[in-house]
Image (cartoon, rainbow, N blue to C red):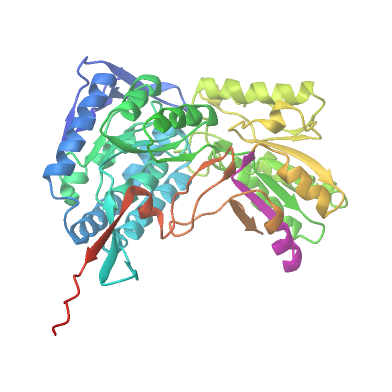
Amino acid sequence: MAAGARSYGLVIGGREEPGHRGETRGVLNPATNAPFAEVAVADADDARHAMEAADAAFHESAWASDDGTRRARALFALARLLEDRQEAFARLETENMGKTLKEARIDVGFVVRTLEYVGGLADKIQGETIPVPGSRFDYTLREPLGVTVHIAPWNYPLLLAMRSVAPALAAGNAVVLKPASLTPLSAIAIARLAHDAGIPDGILNVVNGAGGAVGDALVRDPRCRSVSFTGSAEVGVRIAEVAAGRLLPVTLELGGKSPVLVFPDADLDRAARGIALGIFQNAGQMCWAASRLAVHESVRDDLLGRVRKIAEATRIGPGADEGVEMGPVVSREQESRILGYIEAARRDGGTVVVGGGRSTDPHLAAGNFVLPTIVADVPPASRAVREEIFGPVLSAVSFADADDAVRIANDTAYGLFASVWTRDLATAHAIARRLEAGMVSVNEPPITFPQTPFAGFKQSGLGFEQGIRVVENYTRRKNVVVNLGAAKRKG
């Protein structure tokens, strides 16, 4: 481990501690593959310890027993603490995951806004009264579930963790969060702030470790009352199978292969910028990356030329460097996976328009730098078109008419996101209704807000995150009926 490397433990019951085996792992900077921090590694016993601590806190801390005011104030306080440390958290995300500082700052800002938004919902969790026959009073209650488990991915380490953790806390639950093994640092760092924000010890716990051991132990633990997972479809299905055995509610966000439809009347300059942002931001490591371009045949060459120029001009390098527009991918393994998909596209008959490999800049040789890539006319059956690449790789085809465009867009097992570029609002609304996607943007790259639902169709997952009803994901409904015993008439 490099001299001066920072040390991170597991956060269990309000204390930061090593795993019971004392195992640690170096955390690498993707721009250099050099270790810069050391993190404790949990195992199944540590997972059970965290669940035990969370369960005790849920039952003993009174976190769930008030009208939500205490929880609202704590989440607002956590938002302020994070906002005060926004630059430090952004730099930690960049160093750990590789994304540019600009992107990391936006991510941390989104987490601040998420905490504010769900904090505002914490004291508005309420039931309803229901008219029923006879002299009875019927009402419902919304109660927290208990201990909720959250398994987060590596591409947006803090943002996608807190997207589910924050509403679970707002609803009064105790939380155990397992961050991705590659990128655990920001989750541990925010858990360090919990006590100062007024969150009782044991209500927010973080255990880092391998998903196969730690994640499985968390989901199988008898104290687990719900699971939120963001990651691959394969792992999501396994989690759903385990949860089904205990009838646990699950929220699964499992990725996508998102289409971009560009009609001939679109503003091509604006569309080109949006397409590039939708596939090259975060080095394409996004569940909703706009990775499949379908453009009307009459403007195909013009649009591809514009996107190519943007790709060629994109400055890649370490995310912390000034002016860098695309950072490295998260690991050597991920780099190899992306390059394998590009090679498969070539073998299947696709034409590389730009990019197509890793950077040849000698200054970037130690890092995981893949060039922004466009591959045209890849056959629909190619793995590069069917499977999620999770890298800065755009596949491009042309379409003849609206029906052809919709057919291409929907020809995928996924259904997370789609975008439509046109000046004609009638076309925009008509196409949006026909697309098999949980989210559609018109004349926008992928965009979301804490108040807008984030959900997918088909193999993109189950349930939803964000939006005004998200807190209900982490509650259960109880119905109460009271017989008022109408007084008998005398005489």
**Placement of the N terminus among the 4 image quadrants:** top left
Residue 12 on image: x %, y %: 20, 32
The single residue placed furthest to the front in the displayed view is 491
Residue at the spot 46% in from the left edge and 34% down from the top edge? 98
Residue at the spot 37% in from the left edge and 57% down from the top edge? 113
Front-lying residue, 488 or 127:
488
**Residue 371 quadrant:** top right
Q: In the rendered view, does 281 fall on the left or right side of 345?
A: left
Q: In the rendered view, does 290 fall on the left or right side of 125?
A: right
Front-lying residue, 69 or 11:
69
As drawn, 23 above or below 269:
above
Count of numbered circles in the view: 0
Q: In the rendered view, does 329 fall on the left or right side of 295?
A: left
Residue at the spot 26% in from the left edge and 69% down from the top edge? 136
In this view of the protein, can residue 65 be seen by the observer?
yes
As drawn, 29 above or below 413:
above
**Placement of the C terminus among the 4 image quadrants:** bottom left
Front-lying residue, 391 or 478:
478
Residue at the spot 62% in from the left edge and 56% down from the top edge? 441
Residue 91 on image: x %, y %: 37, 40
Front-lying residue, 292 or 490:
490
User: Magenta span covers which residues?
Assistant: 414-431
Residue 2 on image: x %, y %: 31, 19
Is residue 459 within the magenta segment?
no
The single residue placed furthest to the bottom in the displayed view is 491
Residue 154 on image: x %, y %: 44, 33
In this view of the protein, can residue 84 be seen by the observer?
no
